[in-house]
Amino acid sequence: MSLAPYIPGEQPRDAGIVKLNTNENPYPPSPKVIEALKSADWERLRLYPDPACTALREAIAKQRHVDAVQVFAGNGSDEVLAFAFGAFFAGRSDSCGPLLFPDITYSFYPVYANLWDIPFKEAPLRGDFSIDTGDYREAENGVIFPNPNAPTGIAVPVREITDIAGLCAARNKVLIVDEAYQAFGAESVVPFINENPGLLTVHTLSKSASLAGLRVGFAIGRRHLIEALERIRDSFNSYTVDALAQIAAAAAVLDGEYYDEINKKVIKTRIRVEAELAALGFSCLPSSANFIFTKPPPYIGAPRLSALLREKGVLVRYFDKPRVREYLRVSIGRDCDMDRFLEICAYAVNTINN
Ligand SMILES: *Cc1c(COP(=O)(O)O)cnc(C)c1O
């Protein structure tokens, strides 16, 4: 078997680097997370964790107004996604058509499809990089996309998503909406889970909850979907979420107030950076996420700006792929981080010959 694995963004060891390359939250996790970890009974680490993640799932259920049996918790949403590909898209007969996702999207989707040997088709985004949900109406073996999409940051209206979910359910297929960046400005489809038996949402604590290092993600869907995920997990490893992660994640989930506050700050900074980039002659796609997808003026070019930023200690993400080679994905950091980024962009505009 030949596998083409996902290539994660760099994690430099030098603390002086301004990291705008992997969409981590620039603000610390809730103080309640730190407290919960400090007051945990560490001696209990000799025991296996609760394989059902009961307290964590109850916390998520309370916060999202669903039932705990409609929640699945995993070791990062990447793991939840890996299980979901196996549970809902793998092992179909060749006659049932490909899994559909956008041509420009989270680059783990084709990796999981290949790993599980799932035929897939990439539906091209429109010229303005928005998702055309009309492309998914005929889906014969399910659909997955993030909302907002990555790396474009563009969100799809909820009504269009529930339409597709209904069509998938009518064919006994599943629509997965990856809400990794939902907290930064898109509407969630979680309130539509009960009326949509084919709708599964996937969530992560890595971005909006400032806990990328903890590795916790979860899915919400009707009970039969959650049971299918549990079957895959229990055929693989029953204890995917460790005991301390369960404690910290539950504390995070219950502190919505703190996270609303820091994520509002991220959104405010994003809006300011978009305006300042526009003034420098950069274009930005309309972002509902904690990153922007921006195109520097052609006389600078994305690869050159990316290299200049790196030389000056600022990491951003560049995808050398058709349609997006002119763009850089820039995570929203603290205001001082973004000032450093903008300063280098202005320097490029002023020094590179037009
Ligand atoms: C970051 C990201 C994830 C993965 O999150 P983890 O929970 O850290 O594994 C999933 N989907 C999308 C679209 C992401 O950008």
Image: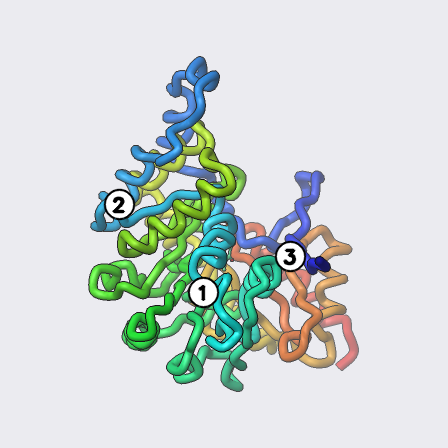
What is the number of the mark on residue 6?
3
Front-lying residue, 7 or 319: 7
Is disc 3 surrounded by few (<14), some (14 to 19) or many (20+) residues within 10 Å?
A: few
The first of marks 2 and 1 along the sequence is 2
Residue 177: x, y in percent? Answer: 39, 63
Whether the residue carrying mark 1 lies under 8 Å from ligand 1 is answered with yes
Question: With 135 as the anchor, is 279 left or right in this view?
Answer: right
Question: With 16 as the anchor, is 85 left or right in this view?
Answer: left
The secondary structure type at the circle numbered 2 is helix
Q: Say whether marks 1 and 3 touch (CB < 8 Å).
A: no
- At label 2, the amino acid type is Val
In the figure, residue 244 lies in which quadrant?
top left
Q: Residue at x 32, y 53 (%)?
A: 220
Q: Residue at x 30, y 63 (%)?
A: 189
Question: Residue farthest to the top?
Answer: 43
Whether the residue carrying mark 3 lies under 8 Å from ligand 1 is answered with no
Which mark lies nearer to you, 1 or 3?
3
Front-lying residue, 166 or 227: 227
In the figure, residue 131 lies in which quadrant?
bottom left
Distance (Cα) linking label 2 and label 1: 23 Å
Residue beneath disc 1: 146
- At label 1, the amino acid type is Pro
Q: Is residue 200 above or below residue 93?
A: above
Residue beneath disc 2: 69
